[in-house]
Amino acid sequence: MRGRARAFVLAVTTLGCAAAVAGCGGEHGRDTVQLTLTAPTDGALVDVRELAVLGTVQPQAATVLVQGARAAVRHGVFRRWIRLHKGVVRIRIRAAAAGYRAATMYVSVRSASRAYGDAGSTQGRHSAVPASTDSPVGTGEYPASLENRMYTSCQLVGGAPRVCRCRLMYIERHTPVSTLLRSSYALLRGSGPLPKWAIDATVHCGD
């Protein structure tokens, strides 16, 4: 039980750090590659089989890898097309340059099933900007972007959608967002115990 709760907290924290700019929780200095993601949006619902990952990087000569494959970089703007599988897809972006500390970030999208096998669907390359969804996944007490990241991260560690929504709503009702983030980052740094809210949510919602 505690192992599942710990995996959930670490996934939440990792995705929370990857919201916009790489380096959350680490040192920010002039010697760190600056990596910014333009698209896709973390936690977005998409209905395509192929998606363009876009962003910017400084220094402009940095090498960018998306899912381990080299992205095209021109004047500090990078692009890489990736193929998606059905369900939650976690995308890893890493940038490195000589004389700089490398930067790594993660973003997750959910690929809808209609792009897989529907006779009337178009299955080629699509716009890099994913379709969004207005359907709430939590109570609305946390920012929507954080709700989406938590819901997605729960599925990444094996949680069923029903269970993940239950955990999210339970945590929102019982834990201030400041407490959530403070304890999550402490655990990620190895300087804090497993948060009580993670254990309680896991016990309350089960598997």
Image (cartoon, rainbow, N blue to C red):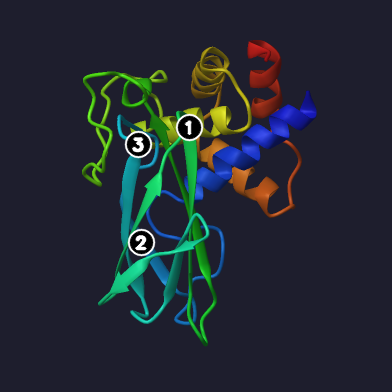
Nearer mark to the viewer, of 2 and 1: 1
Label 2 sits on a secondary structure element that is strand
The residue lying at 26 percent from left, 39 percent from top is 124
Instruction: Residue type at mark 2: give it.
Output: Thr
The residue lying at 61 percent from left, 48 percent from top is 185
Instruction: Residue type at mark 3: give it.
Output: Arg
- Residue 54 is situated, as x and y percent measured from the top left of the image, at 30, 57
Nearer mark to the viewer, of 1 and 3: 3
For residue 40, say whether it is visible. Answer: no
Circle 2 residue:
36
Circle 1 residue:
88
Instruction: Residue type at mark 1: give it.
Output: Val
**First-in-chain label (1 vs 3):** 3
- Residue 178 is situated, as x and y percent measured from the top left of the image, at 51, 39
Label 1 sits on a secondary structure element that is strand
* Residue 127 image-quadrant placement: top left
- Find out whether the residues at labels 2 and 1 contact each other: C-beta distance under 8 Å: no
- Residue 12 lies left or right of residue 81; in this view the side is right
Q: Quadrant of the C terminus?
A: top right
> Does residue 48 lie above or below 136 as drawn?
below
Q: How much space separates mark 1 and mark 3, taking CA atoms? A: 12 Å
- Residue 52 is situated, as x and y percent measured from the top left of the image, at 31, 50
- Residue 187 is situated, as x and y percent measured from the top left of the image, at 69, 46
Q: Quick one: which residue is furthest to the bottom in this view?
A: 99
Crowding near the residue tagged with mark 3, few <14, some 14–19, many ≥20 C-alpha atoms within 10 Å: many
**First-in-chain label (2 vs 3):** 2
Label 3 sits on a secondary structure element that is loop
Circle 3 residue:
49
